[in-house]
Amino acid sequence: MMNFLRKYQVHVLVGLLSFFVLYIALGFGSSFFVKGSPNDTIVEVDGVKIPLRTYWSHYNRSLDTTKPLDEAGRNQKRDETIRDLVQNAVFKREVDHYGIRVPDTQVAISLTQVPGFQTDGKFDPQRYMQVIQSQLRITPQEFEEEQRLSIAFYKLRWMMQSAIKVTDKEMELNGQYPAFAKSSQVEETEVKDPKTGKVTGHKKRQRSEMEIRELFRKKLWEEKTYYGFNQWLTQIGQQLRVKTHFDVLENGAQG
């Protein structure tokens, strides 16, 4: 995966992405190994072709230059890169399907908030170009499209989450509440030294019945959200058709 982007991207979807990688694997494997593929295509996702140059861009960005890879490590990095590319292709398809749009101004604002592009807490255009060209080794247009996709999928996730509700009836019918309420009666928080920020102790307070009920509602909401995304991603993974063209890598061209 793209370590730099994971570190600096504004909208991080770590949990969701990990699920997606898992379910993509359902449609990804040796059965899709194709010989004699076009040299300009490394992987096809439901017929959408991803060029070799895109593969090398993502692959090289994921490398740790201080740790040389053996053959097993290179193969693992190859598979991770292919999954990233498949993931991105499906994300783009889904946000397009739901009509999610990200204006240029929103992309620009998100870039100004990336710490890696700042000097003294302010966006630095020169630093931005330097990082893009020397570390990521892609064009600003390519990076900004990646950022646009990340924001778009964040919007899609928010849209789906906002439709999930937990009713009072659901809470009443759930048999977990008595045990949850008993274990949640007391809230314990850290006490920090205002000067050093170090934890100096803990304090406790009794939660109200309403607070406990809302905590339980939140717990059920998270479970429903987890289940909903799980089902959605499983369906995508089961229907996904991926063809890998690893033979183009044997040519060694890093265009």
Image: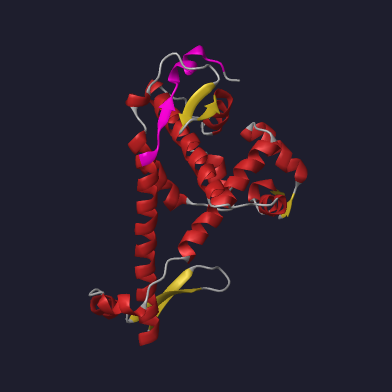
Across and down, in percent, residue 219 comes to: 36, 69
Q: What residue is at 62 percent from the left and 47 percent from the top? A: 148
Q: What residue is at 37 percent from the left and 32 percent from the top? A: 28
Q: How many marks?
A: 0
- State yes or no: residue 241 in magenta: yes
Which quarter of the picture shows residue 177? bottom left
From the viewer's side, name the closer residue of 34 and 179. Answer: 34
Q: What residue is at 56 percent from the left and 47 percent from the top? A: 96
Q: Is residue 57 above or below residue 15?
A: above
**Image check: 134 left or right of 204?**
right
**Image check: 41 left or right of 19?**
right
Which quarter of the picture shows residue 133? top right
Across and down, in percent, residue 39 comes to: 53, 16
From the viewer's side, name the closer residue of 136 and 148. Answer: 148
Across and down, in percent, residue 247 comes to: 45, 16
**Image check: 25 left or right of 130?**
left
Is residue 119 visible in the rendered image? The answer is no
State how the image is colored: secondary structure
- State yes or no: residue 189 in magenta: no
Residues rendered magenta in the picture: 239-253
Locate the C terminus and report the quarter of the image it occupies. Answer: top right
Across and down, in percent, residue 175 comes to: 22, 75
Is residue 221 visible in the rendered image? The answer is yes
